[in-house]
Amino acid sequence: MTVSGIRSFLFAVAFAAASLLPASAIADVPQWRMSLDLDPAAGGITGELELDLPAGIHEFRLLDALELQAARAGDTELTTSRAGAGRYRVELPADSWVTVSWGGTLPDGDPMRSRLFLTAAGGFLPEGTDWYPRFEQESFALRLEARVPEGQRFVATGSLRGEPVSSDGHYSAVHEHPRTDAVVVVTGPWVERSLETNGVQVRTLFRDDLDAAHAQNYLEHSAEYLRMFSERAGPYPYDSFTIAATPMPVGYAFPGFTVLGERVIPLPFIPRTSLAHELMHNWWGTGVRIDYATGNWSEALTTYMADYHLDELRGEGRSTRHRWLLDLAWLPVEEDRPLEAFRGGNQGANRIVGYNRGALLFHMLRERIGDEAFDAGTRKIADRHMFDVAGWEDLIRAFSDAAGRDLDSFFTPWLERSDLPELALHSVQQEKNGSGWVLRGELEQAQEAAPWPLRVPVVVETDAGQQRHVVELDTRQARFDLALEAPAQAITADPDFDVLRRLPDPPPILRTASLNPNTRLIATQEGLAPFARAILEHPPEMADEFDPQQPLLVMGSTDDVIRWLDAAGAPKAPEDLARRGHARMWTLPGTRTAVVSSSDAEGLRNLVGALRHHGHRSYLVQDADGRTTEYGVWEAETNPLRIEVD
């Protein structure tokens, strides 16, 4: 074995001892050792990357603002040449360990707008920005050692190894990952706090004020989620989990850590919602990586196993599923797409398709195969693909193996089609049958498109209480005969919104207007177009009159809006909502109109800033300080899937 081979073998054994991958699986992964010296105040970076390369010509990318200082194979200086803007080429006569050195000052970046920045207030060195020599290797094992001036801290891709060290006026630490495809480093003027749970070190890296007010809460929630998620998805794939603060208004998940905006961290709902989502991505998305060519399954499975699971524990599962179906009901046809076409994006149509539709697919899967098989399937995905890529086909095989039956015919339509089933319930009658009763009827898929594979829950209300049944509906129609001990009073198909379907009579919500690219604006005063654009996400055209059948946004001051709606003959706001609170949004039942009004410009600014999180509401009221005091969804006027039984 060569010296290079011995080093590679020892490197693989070290990783195997602390990872979920066997040594045999890691031995073939290229090895990267990176050392960094970062000076956030000056935007300075000095680095050295050591990697094992085969003989031949290799290309790598490096940001033009940084200088390539040297490339060596052992003690031999290598000749590098330019291969284009930000691209270099180097030729190796034989297999060798290569060391590439680089350094310089990163371009000035605004944390609110830039993807790449390094400042005393915070630094973000993400993948794809060429801040390090990026060789064309699909994946590699990483050992990264970095140091920053005392008063600064950093977190990087993978698990924290050992304890960070403070000496000579610097803070240094080591991070390792057994198989990754990118290196990410985040820095900040942070205080470090930690606790250990089940062998995992959970850390917060927050500014002083955020640390004192919020760090312990984040640590405790993270520890609880780690225990909860490990029971369902298998062991947490890293030795550490870090929550780091950033000036950016974001929430990002990376291998072994998450980055949350400094303005996001104090929001009271984040530890109970978004934190769980970002932590679950350490299994799905950064642990098991996504085969983007076949579609992004990660957001759907993460949403279902984190966000929805917590909603379910709080008794809010039904309302969450109803919200998802409402979003889908108002998604314009031109904005819809098959689930396998989703690649990413967490706003608007992208979120509704990739997160909500996908999560409901996994809910129907769990209802079909049961809790035990579902969790066994997720553990198989983790066991087979951790630190590797997986596509929808890999998920189908894992769940099929766990369920003991082929699930391809179930998954395929939901991945390839963008329409939705429409249910109809009819021909319901009951009759006496010996000492009991029998309720007969027919469930139908009423959409013009081909039938979907469905299992539809039906609930029968009887004199003796409720009875729940399931009707298999893989074809256009299915007859059912339900044996009852007492006479039926009513029957409802899918009363709890367990089926991914089109709602027959959806009440209007803000998305009724905000999602539609044809929504126009009626402004009762000048200067409101920027506020409208923040809601609609497109420059609005102006409208002259009210049309209940056209998507419309009406915006202005409280009194002006009321006068305009009265003059237009629009439906009245329910329960005098038009004057409630300081600012408010409501939709007009029976129309495709959303109304936004406020007592002053500051109230309008607060309201518009909040509405991006409330697209699934029919109404919302805020006080003068911008606090939300009321919100909700109108009741549907009819329910064709409920029939009173004679």
Image (cartoon, grey):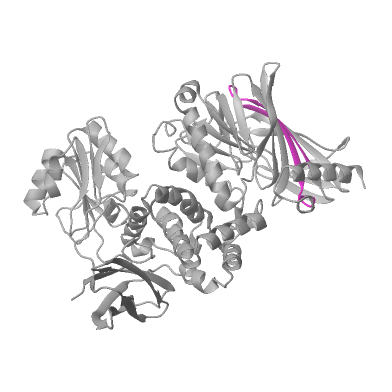
Residue 502 falls in which quadrant of the image? bottom left
Identify the image quadrant of the C terminus: bottom left
> Against 80, is 54 above or below?
below
Decide if residue 387 is in sight here.
yes
> Against 220, is 467 above or below?
below
Q: Nearer the viewer, residue 603 or 373?
A: 373
**On the rendered structure, is 262 left or right of 546?**
right
Residue that sits furthest to the right in the current view: 1
Q: Residue 26: percent from the left, percent from the top?
A: 76, 50
Q: Residue 339: percent from the left, percent from the top?
A: 47, 63
Residue 491 falls in which quadrant of the image? bottom left
User: What is the magenta segment's predominant secondary structure?
Assistant: strand
Decide if residue 445 is in sight here.
no
Q: Residue at x 60, y 44 (%)?
A: 128
Asked whether 34 falls inside the magenta stretch, the response is yes
Residue that sits furthest to the front in the current view: 435
Q: Residue at x 83, y 50 (%)?
A: 54
Q: Nearer the viewer, residue 632 or 180?
A: 632
Q: Residue 383: percent from the left, percent from the top?
A: 65, 55
**On the rendered structure, is 252 left or right of 25?**
left
Q: Residue at x 57, y 52 (%)?
A: 233
Q: Residue 306: percent from the left, percent from the top?
A: 48, 49
Asked whether 15 falls inside the magenta stretch, the response is no
Q: Nearer the viewer, residue 605 or 227?
A: 227
Q: Nearer the viewer, residue 565 or 542?
A: 565
**On the rendered structure, is 615 left or right of 312?**
left
Tell me where the magenta segment starts and ends, as one range.
26-51
**On the rendered structure, is 488 left or right of 95?**
left
Q: Residue at x 34, y 62 (%)?
A: 497
